[in-house]
Image: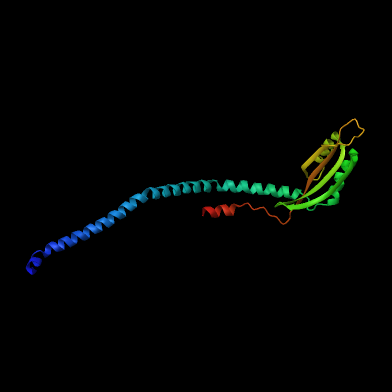
Amino acid sequence: MKELLIKNFHWLIIFYAANNIFMLYQEKNDQYQNILTQTPVIKAKIEKEKRKLIQIEEFKKNLTETKKRVKEVVKQIEKVQKQLPTDVNDAQVQSLLSDIGSKLRVQSESSSPGQEDNNGFYFAKLYQYQARGTFIQSIIFFENLEKAERILNVKSFNIEAIKDVVRSRFQIVDFQITVESFRYNKNYRESDGIKAIEQQFN
């Protein structure tokens, strides 16, 4: 038995080596197959990164021109901002509304200030105005409001024919207007956002 083992020992070594080689081959083949399955994903990632690089290069080419345009827009915003008054005087706005109504001889007029909202580079304050007059008077009221030196915005309005019987050749209406008055926010500074954009592409 011992002689048989010694005589065939070389076959045991060959079998052992062949088995190890086969196991190594199988391991490498599995790794290779795994790489093959990942190849499309890797290619897709590479293509995506290439597209990003192209976009970055395009952005860099246009960056100087974009900076100029953005800075110009910021300058325009600052210019408009400075055209607004630094404060809103409730009495002045209400007096303006009342004067227009008085000249048109409307009746039952009243006005009251509302809340003020912070909208970034400006504050907006609401004023409620209501009066009674003819439909034509209500239209002329809007026209006169448009001619006012102060920047005012008619945010909403409502015109309703009154149900009461009134002796008049013209239709009498009640009209309510919500007017916005604006003032400059001196604590606000418009950002051009260029640094933030540049950081995204660095």
Task: Give the image quarter of residue 14.
Answer: bottom left
Residue 54 location, x and y as percent? Answer: 47, 46
Depth check, front residue: 144 or 82: 144
Residue 58 location, x and y as percent? Answer: 51, 45
Give the colour scheme shown.
Answer: rainbow
At a point 28% along the width and 56% down the height, the residue shown is 28
- 31 in relation to 168, above or below: below
At a point 69% along the width and 48% down the height, the residue shown is 77
Task: Give the image quarter of residue 129.
Answer: top right
Depth check, front residue: 146 or 35: 35
Q: Is residue 102 left or right of residue 65?
A: right
At a point 45% along the width and 48% down the height, the residue shown is 48
Q: Is residue 109 left or right of residue 198?
A: right
Residue 96 location, x and y as percent? Answer: 86, 45
Which residue extends farthest top?
A: 169
Residue 13 location, x and y as percent? Answer: 15, 63
At a point 20% along the width and 59% down the height, the residue shown is 19
Q: Is residue 58 left or right of residue 17?
A: right
Q: Is residue 118 left or right of residue 112?
A: left
Numbered label tally: 0
